[in-house]
Image: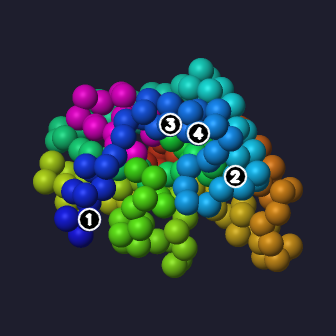
Amino acid sequence: MLSIIKSAIQKSISYSEYRTLVSKLISEGKSTGKEQSADLLHYSELNEVRMNRLEKTLKMDSEVLEKLQNLKAKQTWLVISEGWCGDAAQILPIIKLMAESSENINLKIVLRDENDDLMAQFLTNGARSIPKLIVLDENLEVINHWGPRPEAAKNLILDYKAKHGIVDEPAKIALQKWYLEDKGISTMKEIVGIIHE
């Protein structure tokens, strides 16, 4: 596991590099990842708008901020993501804001499709669901991991799928509405809860 993590960190990029990469690919009519399609490009474009908005409007929860500022040991937060992922677009700006709130957090991002070995270690019910946050200590040992979405958002999708049999466009719209109303608070509180365990 340690060699997989070290390899991923060597290939990782910063948040600003991730944003630049996604924007550059969109300008070329592409998305991140091995698969390319009009849908994935469309989702990437939507997500860029979402991330721009979130970067301007997100506010740090004061309780979460205090816990982050009291973090004693250095941590690396390694996030597995892709530009077309709607959950990643909602969650990455929150993770960035949290990481910036503590001098002890170093945020790194890797693309899922370029890191199969890493993704295989952090599946969600057997699926390669993203985003996935892996919290590492100073020795790059896994403290904990979180993702792909907050509990309430996860339940919203599970309930919808149980009722309708699929996750379609109305489900995705309902999920984005939930994120909008939650303002990142659930994500912040869940993440801060796992970094101290």
Q: Amino acid at mark 1?
A: Ile
In the rendered structure, the answer to whether residue 77 lies left or right of residue 47 reads left
CA–CA distance between discs 3 and 4? Answer: 6 Å
Tell me whether circle 4 and circle 2 mark residues in contact (CB < 8 Å): no
Q: Earlier in the sequence, mark 1 or mark 2?
A: 1
- Residue at the image point whose x is 82% and y is 77% from the top: 165
The picture places residue 29, in percent across and down from the top left corner, at 68, 41
What is the quadrant of the N terminus in the image?
bottom left
CA–CA distance between discs 4 and 2? Answer: 11 Å
What stretch of residues is rendered in magenta?
95-109
Tell me whether circle 3 and circle 4 mark residues in contact (CB < 8 Å): yes
Dot 2 alpha-carbon crowd within 10 angstroms: few under 14, some 14 to 19, many 20 or more = some
Residue where numbered disc 1 is placed: 4
Q: Nearer the viewer, residue 64 or 137?
A: 137
- Residue at the image point whose x is 36% and y is 65% from the top: 118
CA–CA distance between discs 1 and 2? Answer: 28 Å
Q: Amino acid at mark 4?
A: Leu
On screen, 1 above or below 50?
A: below
Q: Is residue 87 inside the magenta stretch?
A: no
Q: Earlier in the sequence, mark 4 or mark 2?
A: 4
Dot 3 alpha-carbon crowd within 10 angstroms: few under 14, some 14 to 19, many 20 or more = some
Instruction: Tell me the number on the disc at residue 21.
Output: 3
In the rendered structure, the answer to whether residue 6 lies left or right of residue 148 reads left
- Residue at the image point whose x is 58% and y is 33% from the top: 23
